[in-house]
């Protein structure tokens, strides 16, 4: 076993370290911690944050890759947890939690009938036995979850932020869901299988990492140009401002999705020509994901840049900036020491708001054919593949439904959290902090 | 006013040149004409001679920026950059890589696009504003809280979900509308109604919140307090004063989008197989027809710049405080 570092793994872990550092900084600053406590004082914000963090943990566990020295196959930590369903590929479709295949085929006795799946409890031979088995597992998981939840409740309920129903319910649901999945996964295809017999739950869970990377890396890569150019335009004014404004108006003028499509097409042509340069298809698709983020960042920094420019224009007229100038403080120090901290609320709001939008865009890009690599598991690719299955008879709904539900969970929790962050940090909102 | 408009038009020329330069770099330098030839001719069994003849046929056989072999101004004009850019500024898009006349295609395909885009735009605008006004009317109530969370949920659902499900249920199961396709003329309403409804619903969450925030910003201004102090009823304050003043940010935010409606909607058109400019672009992307993609990028930029110009002009119409400078 040796660790394989993919580019996106490195980026994601650097990001994790940065956010740990940010938390440390926030804890030290009193005014900032007060703001964050005020964010979490809304149960709905804290609940969605907990769900969001849960997604992040899944994504992170999928970002440590190990190469098996014998078979030289690369698996992530998450893959090891999901191994039972990776190793049991079925022949074709099966509905969620079923013990039989979706379509009939010829049996040994020459008649047509439903074949039992490979990955199913041995002793089950009828639908009612199947339901009974599932109910027993669920009841058992519920019991374990309650027992496990008692110490958590005891630890958490003395803290004012956590002692309310929505938050406790969220924590309990996550605990229960985890235990239920741990109990069910070795016996069943929880969300059924797709046309090629691959487990849908596995695909949907693996897509979390793709969506997360897409949202997080793109937003973060767009920050440096947006912040630096926005500050410079607002502070130096004149010629510098003209040039920076010209650059972002020009980029804005190009229809976003077309610019992305054009860049991705070119990337595709380039990568196809240099296909021999990549060690494995995993590394190739990973690099493509990273470059896709770069492309999206290139087209999406302009919005924040314009906001920061406008804010800096206002700030640089204030006394404290003028005083700093008179005292002979260097321009760079004024820009990054005096002005930047005062536009950070805009940056934070844009990070949380853009994230969810990007996760949704990934699906659309994959549909147009300029999204992530076809071998990368992503909700966009799942939706794209499942689109035609809806017109099948009888209808194949579960791959599509699974990808939508997983995506909805991530985006909704991110959106609800973002909403609260904006309420607290945006001086214009000021309804009730 | 005319001098202002002329000056603004002159300002937009450098932006168009910039756009053109970026697209040129993308389509001709990163992706050389040789690459394009290979994509169009297929990758196997293609000799250099085939590539050269394809380039000659499509006019890609000249130097990129600077031609040493000719004299005078032709050094600059007899190049791919000039030959492929100058016609764009006269909105002459030439031929696609597969040999079709792009201008004719655009003229033919703009009507289905407009038939879908204009009603979608108008209905979405009206629905969003109506719901936003309703939410301001019940501001602070439990119902409003719920509506707010609900609109967050609406905007957290992928647009593809609305399209796929709408198409499946309304057209597929209930048979209210055809699943996809298009007929020119009056009959077209049967084909565009469903995409319009879906488009309005898909944009509702984000739209309502956007207009609501505009109204809230307006409602905190001093003139609203004055109006209330005079003893006007809440409804009168809202509809007579707030709505009227909020029209300024709404109008100016909306005007910039209007010209780009022309480009059609990529996703809607391709899902409902409406033969508009959006599906035209998607087809071009899938076929890697760079001439069409480049034409559409340029066209989109021109329309966006027209939108910016209209925004500036519309400011002066709705807000007498803004003067032409």
Image (spheres, coloured by chain):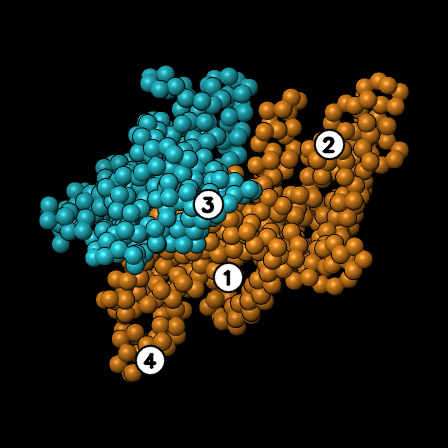
Circle 1 packing at 10 Å, graded few (<14), some (14-19), many (20+), is: some
Instruction: Find the distance from the CA under tag 1 to the CA under tag 4.
Output: 32 Å
Query: Chain A takes which shade in the image?
Result: orange
Read off the residue under disc 1.
A36
Question: Is label 3 on the same chain as label 4?
Answer: no
Label 1: chain letter: A
Read off the residue under disc 2.
A92
Q: Secondary structure at mark 2?
A: loop
Residue at image point 28% right, 70% down: A236
Between discs 4 and 2, the one toward the N terminus: 2
Where is residue A184, by image quadrant?
top right
Q: Nearer the viewer, residue B317 or B168?
A: B168
Query: Chain B takes which shade in the image?
Result: cyan
Q: Which mark is residue A187?
A: none
Q: Quadrant of the C terminus of chain B?
A: bottom left
Instruction: Find the distance from the CA under tag 3 to the CA under tag 4.
Output: 61 Å
Residue at image point 57% right, 32% down: A387
Read off the residue under disc 3.
B49
Q: Nearer the viewer, mark 1 or mark 2?
A: 2
Read off the residue under disc 4.
A330
């Amino acid at each position: 076993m040796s660790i394989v570092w993919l580019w996106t793994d490195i980026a994601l872990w650097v990001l994790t370290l940065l956010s740990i550092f940010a938390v440390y900084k926030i804890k030290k600053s009193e005014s900032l911690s007060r703001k964050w406590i005020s964010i979490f004082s809304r149960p709905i914000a804290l609940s969605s944050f907990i769900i969001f963090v849960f997604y992040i943990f899944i994504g992170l566990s999928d970002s440590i890759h190990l190469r098996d020295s014998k078979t030289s196959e690369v698996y992530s930590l998450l893959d090891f947890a999901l191994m039972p369903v990776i190793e049991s590929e079925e022949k074709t479709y099966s509905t969620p939690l079923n013990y039989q295949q979706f379509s009939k085929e010829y049996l040994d006795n020459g008649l047509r009938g439903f074949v039992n799946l490979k990955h199913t409890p041995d002793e089950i031979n009828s639908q009612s036995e199947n339901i009974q088995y599932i109910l027993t597992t669920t009841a058992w998981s519920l019991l374990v979850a309650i027992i496990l939840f008692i110490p958590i409740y005891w630890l958490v309920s003395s803290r004012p932020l956590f002692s309310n129903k929505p938050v406790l319910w969220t924590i309990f649901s996550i605990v229960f869901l985890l235990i239920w999945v741990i109990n069910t996964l070795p016996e069943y295809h929880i969300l059924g299988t797709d046309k090629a017999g691959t487990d849908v739950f596995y695909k949907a869970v693996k897509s979390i990492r793709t969506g997360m990377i897409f949202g997080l890396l793109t937003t973060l890569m767009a920050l440096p140009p947006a912040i630096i150019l926005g500050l410079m335009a607002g502070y130096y004014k004149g010629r510098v401002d003209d040039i920076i404004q010209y650059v972002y108006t020009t980029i804005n003028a190009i229809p976003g999705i077309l610019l992305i499509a054009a860049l991705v097409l070119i990337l595709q042509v380039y990568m196809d020509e240099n296909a021999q340069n990549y060690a494995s298809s995993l590394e190739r698709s990973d690099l493509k994901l990273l470059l896709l983020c770069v492309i999206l960042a290139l087209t999406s920094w302009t919005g924040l840049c314009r906001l920061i420019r406008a804010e800096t224009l206002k700030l640089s007229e204030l006394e404290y900036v003028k005083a700093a100038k008179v005292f002979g403080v260097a321009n760079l120090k004024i820009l990054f020491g005096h002005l930047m901290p005062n536009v950070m609320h805009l940056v934070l709001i844009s990070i949380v708001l853009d994230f969810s939008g990007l996760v949704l865009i990934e699906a659309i890009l994959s549909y147009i054919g300029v999204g992530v690599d076809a071998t990368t598991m992503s909700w966009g690719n799942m939706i794209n593949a499942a689109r035609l299955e809806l017109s099948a008879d009888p209808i194949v709904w579960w791959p599509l439904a699974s990808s939508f539900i997983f995506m909805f969970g991530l985006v909704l929790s991110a959106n609800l959290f973002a909403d609260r962050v904006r309420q607290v940090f945006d001086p214009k909102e000021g309804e009730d902090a | 006013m005319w001098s202002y408009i002329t000056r603004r038009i002159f300002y937009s020329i450098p932006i168009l040149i910039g756009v053109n330069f970026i697209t040129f770099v993308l389509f001709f330098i990163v992706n050389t004409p040789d690459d394009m030839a290979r994509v169009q001719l297929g990758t196997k069994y293609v000799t250099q001679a085939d590539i050269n003849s394809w380039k000659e046929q499509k006019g890609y056989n000249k130097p990129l920026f600077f031609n040493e072999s000719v004299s005078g101004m032709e050094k600059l004009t007899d190049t791919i950059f000039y030959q492929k850019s100058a016609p764009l500024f006269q909105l002459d898009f030439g031929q696609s890589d597969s040999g079709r006349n792009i201008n004719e295609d655009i003229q033919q395909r703009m009507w289905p696009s407009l038939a879908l885009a204009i009603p979608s735009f108008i209905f979405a605008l009206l629905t969003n504003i109506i719901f936003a006004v309703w939410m301001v009317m019940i501001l602070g109530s439990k119902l409003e809280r719920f509506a707010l969370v609900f609109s967050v949920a609406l905007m957290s659902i992928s647009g593809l979900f609305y399209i796929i499900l709408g198409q499946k249920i309304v057209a597929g199961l209930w048979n209210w509308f055809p699943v996809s396709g298009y007929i020119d003329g009056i009959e077209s309403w049967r084909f565009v109604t469903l995409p319009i409804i879906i488009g309005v619903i898909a944009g509702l969450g984000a739209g309502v919140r956007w207009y609501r925030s505009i109204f809230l910003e307006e409602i905190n201004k001093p003139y609203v307090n004055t109006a209330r102090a005079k003893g006007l009823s809440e409804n009168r304050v809202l509809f007579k004063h707030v709505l009227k003043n909020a029209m300024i940010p709404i109008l100016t935010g909306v005007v910039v989008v209007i010209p780009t409606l022309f480009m059609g909607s990529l996703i809607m058109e391709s899902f409902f197989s409406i033969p508009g400019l959006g599906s035209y672009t998607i087809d071009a992307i899938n076929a890697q027809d760079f001439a069409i993609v480049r034409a559409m990028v340029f066209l989109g930029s021109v329309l966006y710049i027209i939108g910016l110009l209209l925004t500036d002009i519309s400011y002066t119409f709705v807000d007498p405080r803004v003067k032409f400078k």
